[in-house]
Image: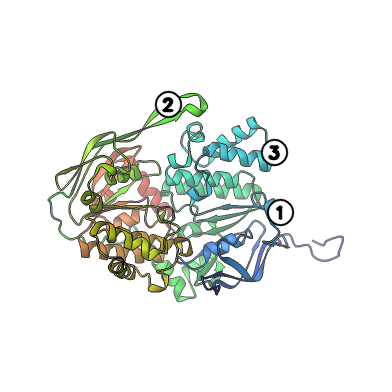
Amino acid sequence: MIDSRTGHPLNLNPDLLTVCDLSIGYRNEFGELKLAVQNLSFSLKDGGSLGIVGESGSGKSTVARALLGYYRGSSERSSGQVKINGTHLNESDKDALSEIRGIEIAFVPQNPLSSLTYHLTVGYQLEEILKTRLGLDDNTAHIRALELFDQTGLPNPKEIFNRFPHQLSGGQRQRVVIACALACRPKLLILDEPTSALDKTTEKQVLELIRSLRHQIDASLVLVTHDLNVVASMCDDILVMKDGLSIEIGPTKETITTPKSEYTKDLVNSVLHLDASPSAVNKLNQEPLLEVNNLSHTYSERFWFFNRESKDNVSLSNVSINLSPGEILGVIGESGSGKSTLGNCVAGLVAASKGEIRFKGELLAPSNKNRSQSQRHIVQIIFQDPLSSLNPRQRIITAVARPIQLFFGVSLTESKKRAAMLLAELGLGSELHDRFPRQLSGGQQQRVAIARAFAAEPELIICDEITSALDANTQSQVLDILRELQVKRSTALLLITHDLAVVWRMAKRVLVLKNGIVHEHGETIDVFKNPKSEYTQSLLEASSRASHFN
């Protein structure tokens, strides 16, 4: 087709996004610029989709933010350009960027909690976007917000609407953020690890929603993720990054099935499978380390602000488990099933409504604040989001040394020496010791959190989705390191995850939760090969459907 104005061929599918020789660096305390992205170039057609993959620290998230003209902290663009529809994104023109963000370009971050305002209900926050960006009136915005919550698979949208971010599970918070991003039907949707906090059933629903809406409005997609399965199901093309460099770029199917670079081959080979052989498990001491008997937890929603009566919700109902020294017990279930509540109750961060928790036969107080110092150090927890659990003003060597000082009364010098040894075991060298959490990648932050937990020399560590933010290669490395530390120290693990392949690889036994109720409990190999519960079957089917590597 010819453009009647110019006489030249008309480009029916022009580039919506163009990145040309982009380099981004971070300045250290001495003012030196260290490049995190180097001479990156790629383009995306209008309506196209690109997946950006690579291990933690490869520069994926830095690139994602640059596509909105955003350079966080001490980062800056040292060279190159980012263009949307041929228009340069000039980060110094804040007014122009403000007009583009949220309307033409929408962004879903990896950490939903950091992008939601903690003291406002999630419904109010979505309504504000609809009113300020689209000009909807109060009633229309309210109806549209409920529709978006329903479309993203949130249970009971009317109840969710009036909850605060901290009252939602990690997966529910992620779906709220996705609803906010989709609200204005953007031309370009940038997703940074959008499904890392979701179980496979919910992940499938969310990805289908994104795929459906994309095609409805012909939106382009840039998907940053560590999950090659997600890229394979969602993206036409794939960009593989390592150390800020483009290693390989091309059609997704071709790149995954016949990768040209050794690094891409390693990423593909690192994907965990449910059909692989489970790890050998040592014979366990049958003397129980942890006994949880008929544990229940009920929380009340108080609506005094809205002049409504409070409502009681059951998040755990008569859950009983036991754990031997050195054993790993997997806990699986969809978002909101009560997995994290169970872990928090055992750790004493949330006081159970009824039931008892015994450690080596000794009754533990429901609340951690009522437990002795010796009881506190023997049970540690690693959270799903390491950034929110690490002190942002504390250097990582100090963060890991602090439990050593607190529980064992050693000097600062000695505690830092022990902390350095732990960090080294987790692959974090001395060059990272004086960095702050935000100066590390997501995978590095999680390894710091793991080191801090082991620093207390606990007998039980509760791992709450600790690999959900990691790429396949780093996930495999961290699980290997975690298993090595766990075996060396005979530490028991309560492994909470939505990734069934992680449980298959790591745990001797598995507990299946839904709506706070135990649906199945037994040897992992028996539960996965011969599930008795329809719910367990659905989880296994969803996990199998999500895999494009079997």
- State the image coordinates of residue 14 (x, y, percent, origin top left): 71, 62
Mark 3: give few (<14), some (14-19) or many (20+) Cα within 10 Å: few
> Answer yes or no: do the residues labelled 3 and 2 have beta carbons within 8 Å?
no
Q: Which mark is residue 310?
A: 2
- State the image coordinates of residue 161 (x, y, percent, origin top left): 51, 35
Q: Report the Cα–Cα distance between label 3 and label 2.
A: 33 Å
Residue found 15% across the figure and 56% down from its top: 284
Residue furthest to the front in view is 411
Query: Which residue type carries mark 2?
Result: Ser
Q: Quadrant of the C terminus?
A: bottom left
Q: Is residue 451 visible?
A: no
| Relative depth, front residue between 378 and 208 | 378
- State the image coordinates of residue 19 (x, y, percent, origin top left): 64, 67
Is 73 situated above or below 359? below
Mark 1: give few (<14), some (14-19) or many (20+) Cα within 10 Å: few
Residue on which the image places disc 3: 135
- State the image coordinates of residue 26 (x, y, percent, origin top left): 54, 69
Q: Which mark is residue 95?
A: 1
